[in-house]
Image (tube, coloured by chain):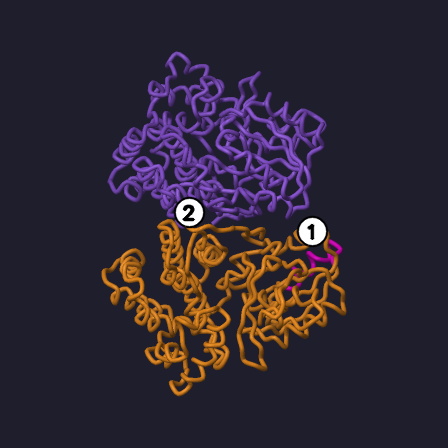
Chain colours: A orange, B purple
Amino acid sequence: MRDFTFYNPTRIEFGKEKENNIGNYITDYGLKKVLIVYGSERIKRDGLLGRVTASLEKNNIQWVAIGGVVSNPLLSKVHEAIFLAKTENVDAVLAVGGGSVLDSAKAIAAGALYDGDVWDFFIFKARAEAALPIFSIMTLAATGSEMNAGGVVMNDETKEKLAIMTPVLYPKVSVINPDLMATVGKDYLAYSAADIFAHCLDLYFTATYIPEFNLSLIENILRTVMTTTDRLLADPNDYDARAEFAWASTIALNGNTFNGVKGNSFDTHMIEHSLSALFNVPHGAGLSAIFPAWMRWHNNQQPERYERFARNVFGTEGIENGIQKLEEWYTKIGTPINLTEANVPKTAIRDLAENAYVLATMWGLTEKYPVDTIAEILEMA
Amino acid sequence: MRDFTFYNPTRIEFGKEKENNIGNYITDYGLKKVLIVYGSERIKRDGLLGRVTASLEKNNIQWVAIGGVVSNPLLSKVHEAIFLAKTENVDAVLAVGGGSVLDSAKAIAAGALYDGDVWDFFIFKARAEAALPIFSIMTLAATGSEMNAGGVVMNDETKEKLAIMTPVLYPKVSVINPDLMATVGKDYLAYSAADIFAHCLDLYFTATYIPEFNLSLIENILRTVMTTTDRLLADPNDYDARAEFAWASTIALNGNTFNGVKGNSFDTHMIEHSLSALFNVPHGAGLSAIFPAWMRWHNNQQPERYERFARNVFGTEGIENGIQKLEEWYTKIGTPINLTEANVPKTAIRDLAENAYVLATMWGLTEKYPVDTIAEILEMA
């Protein structure tokens, strides 16, 4: 095992109706005024926002709200919310929504205590040393953002989709109530599954060293996601399946799979960000669209790991069989397995490769991924 | 899945020579004077204490030290250390040793901020609402105490071995350097393995509800412990094996295996505490001595789980075959599989059962474990 630091102070409140206690959780930290960040207006119609604000008011917590966060969340909205947070002098940020909403809330929380442009943190011009305390109520499981210190935002001017990660961005408390996720459509369930798969498999395949324990843990997460996705497509009201799916999503990116690992990188995430940025492809759909191609390009670098994946996740033998089984499963759940299915024209490959290369530069992956290599992988997709 | 709260703010610093930074870690929390708690004087001879105090002094942290903590740690030593902590006005406690040392340090940290007798916390007469910040440098992997909020201490007057658990007892930072564990003898390695097994299997077998993910996670921990114990018995200097063993030990009791579970209890731990208390049997040895008997008594309550254990952990079929494989493995690594091998006379069974029944009362297990039932299980051992 390689040396590591593990630190994850986020408190998870998991289960039915937990969002109705959000005021108590925030009071535990002595906070008095929160900015609620959310996406669509649906949370007003279905009563979620009302229950949240009722809990806040019962605890004498003031609040202001800003909605309209979209998937592949935009920097312009983050700027707008930071202005509101500063003007209203809030002392906490509460995300009510999915990963995009929480990622925006993290940027807002950091930006609210910073005099410059919050984008500085994304381009490593500055480092976020402080942030308002962050709370979340999740309505979609996928990104793992509820229990990690990272966030991704897209600059709508430059079309760069970039990430921040720093310990001050760990949410204080995240509420995961599987019932709040029951209205997610089959398409977004599939995209979520593909996103969780990519969080696991980027690590599983790229690590130059990874303990046996971590490989088995990842396979456990993958099997959980597959089994529960299948169950949810058959019966969206299967609470246990929804709950196990949600928790697998959290575990996939809360640090446990990374302990003691060396040399891993988020290769498909790096490439995918360009699809989201230039064609607004849902993140999970973009990942499944490039994953099989990337695996066919990459497998000779870790052949034993690909053999093992085929065997332990799909019960088959051989690298190509494992990749095909993954394609079949993606197709079955309804997420694209190539660019065409993701409605991305092949003519855009050069632009996509150049966009992804910006991330390759920031993540120190240019040696492995020159623009031509990224283009080659996209051609294969 | 059942509702749960997960919260584990302990920072783990895992890897080579990490103990040499302990002064920096403590400085991160702005602390100025620590009480070092340790066991045998070996840590002076082998230079560990010197390196620790050098790091403290480099960071201008004052220190006092108290040694002599034994396995099955004694309340009298805890009282002595609390007196020292109060007199010397320390603002943190640093455990350097194994689980017993850290468990004592937790009791000391809570007792130092309490006017009454710290034993009040163990008999639920009072609840520890505050504690001095706790740090640890582990020299033995087994109890998981380095990343949880619990601790066990024995009252040397009443011979009761009882536990406290409350969030203020999470260590701030725990150092796990596998190299510090390389001098552990083969006997204590085996006892540690048996202890980790019991932490996993009490949960695995007793839970009335447990998600598939948790069962697989536990099997993963068990396989890791088995593989790495075998490797360490062959080569005590196998760093990766030592590291994976240590981390499996931490994961086994840091909360992850318990999320979403219902109806679990620490049945063999409850019974074993009497062996430690009355005959000073090493905790792990006591556990392996009663585990096969307990499994034979208990398996009809969760037969599918026992079938699964046999298959997924030992690659065999059938409940009794699984239990026998476990006995064979215990015997191979050198930890007892019955009372005779643990040097506990059968004539003591009544006393042991009555001692264990005290814990059954405190843990709400008297319905499942009347004194006669405990005696029956001990007879089978």
A147 lies left or right of A302? right
- Amino acid beneath label 2: Asn
A77 lies left or right of A330? right
Quarter of the view holding residue B342? top left
Q: Is residue A58 magenta?
A: yes
Question: Does mark 1 fall on the same chain as mark 2?
Answer: no
How many numbered callouts? Answer: 2
Q: Is residue A235 magenta?
A: no
- Amino acid beneath label 1: Tyr
Q: Does residue B91 lie above or below B40 as drawn?
A: below
B83 lies left or right of B214? right
Label 2: element kind: helix
Q: Does residue B138 lie above or below B277 as drawn?
A: below
A25 lies left or right of B173? right
**Residue A305 appears at what percent x and percent y?**
31, 59
Of all chains, the one bearing label 1 is A
**Residue B115 appears at what percent x and percent y?**
72, 28
**Residue B53 appears at what percent x and percent y?**
59, 37
Q: Is residue B129 visible?
A: no
Quarter of the view holding residue B282? top left
Magenta stretch, main secondary structure class: helix
Residue A29's label in the rendered image is 1
Of all chains, the one bearing label 2 is B
Residue that carries the numbered disc 2 in the rendered image: B214
Q: Which residues are magenta?
A: A49-61
